[in-house]
Amino acid sequence: MKYLSFTILCLCLSLSSFAQKQTELDYTIAPWFNNKKAAVSLTFDDGIPGQYAVAVPLLDKYGFKGTFFMSVSIVNSQHISWETINRAALAGHEIANHALTHPHFPKMPLDSIAWECTESNKQMDALLPAQKMITHAYPFGEGGGITEKDKAIRKTVAPYFIGARATQNKPYPYNAYDFAKTNDDYYNINSQMISDSASMANFGKYIDETIAVGGWFCPTYHGIEDGWIITPGKVFAQHLIELDKRKDSVWIAPFKNVIQYHKERNSAKLKLLSKNARRWTLSLTDTLANRQNWTQPLTINFNTNGAVIKSISQKRKKLSFKQSGQVCVFDALPGKDNIEVQFTPNATR
Ligand SMILES: [Zn+2]
């Protein structure tokens, strides 16, 4: 009887390891989209006319998308039309929340801080039908510190956004790849103020330092050509040239997309649900709630063991892919829709 139980146990163990082999998948989710080494988000604060008159056309020339943290009361005082801002949103730039009246959060009760965020979201969502506000930058960068009030500010702001940008809260200009040890860290993203001749001159160096650590660089601009904390248009144009030179190594994307990618990737899993010679069915899932906030596809690299791929689709939509040698690269959105990989039978690489 003892031997019989032992034999059954062994049989079960070997069957379960066989089952495991059948569903094992050799894959990685790239640290950054499109297998880039680092990420850069160009961010602009307050709502100053030159950001739209000078910066947006230059960004559009290169196909780069920026993030514009707008404070409703400043925009209204600067006479920028909300149609102009909505056009930038339609072109793929992110418009985001910088509080309604740009107050000093540390001097306010927490319920007023919450109101500044929700009222600003409400007004901008109505004024800008092209998109929803899902990220925030603290006015004056006040919320990125280590005091109890700073922590309380972050906790107050967090329910309304997927992440928030602070200002210069690290001794280096970037965020290291593993910056998010806790969820609170997504509400304390480091940025580099572009505010003086040194920060303007060091732009290329900042990107190189970020590439070296595989991190995320978020420069903060204010006025471009006009307004306050002014970066001359010529200097800004030079920054885009520096960025363009490094675009093969850097994923240039709005602030929200980088947070989405980082957080989705950290909780995502790719599983092989079934396979035969012609088709593999995969699932890509993560643990994030509120699916409408998580819309950034992830870049998957997986080993096909030499089989040649004919097509990859998700929700009957064809996904583009690249296969070189045994590795296939494609982008897909985590969620409930399985991924179908079709192979060319009897072909190998
Ligand atoms: Zn500001």
Image (cartoon, rainbow, N blue to C red):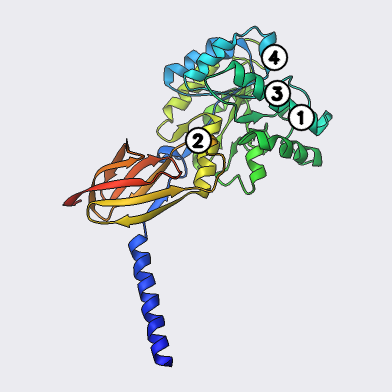
Mark 4 lies within 8 Å of ligand 1 (Cβ measured)? yes
Three-letter code for the amino acid on which mark 4 is drawn: Ile
Find disc 3 in the rendering and name its residue.
119
Residue 325 in the image: above or below residue 319: below
Q: Are marks 3 and 2 in contact (CB under 8 Å)?
A: no
Residue 258 location (% of width, % of height): 52, 35
Between marks 2 and 4, how big is the CA–CA gap? 29 Å
In terms of secondary structure, where does tag 2 sit?
strand
Q: Are marks 2 and 4 in contact (CB under 8 Å)?
A: no
> Mark on residue 74?
4
In terms of secondary structure, where does tag 1 sit?
helix
Could you classify mark 2 by the number of other residues whose Cα lies within 10 Å: few (under 14), some (14-19), or many (20 or more)? many
Q: Are marks 2 and 1 in contact (CB under 8 Å)?
A: no
Could you classify mark 4 by the number of other residues whose Cα lies within 10 Å: few (under 14), some (14-19), or many (20 or more)? some
- Could you tell me which quadrant the N terminus lies in? bottom left
Three-letter code for the amino acid on which mark 3 is drawn: Glu
> Mark on residue 113?
1
Residue 203 location (% of width, % of height): 55, 27
Of marks 1 and 3, which one's residue comes earlier in the chain?
1
Q: Mark 4 or mark 1, which is nearer to you? A: 1
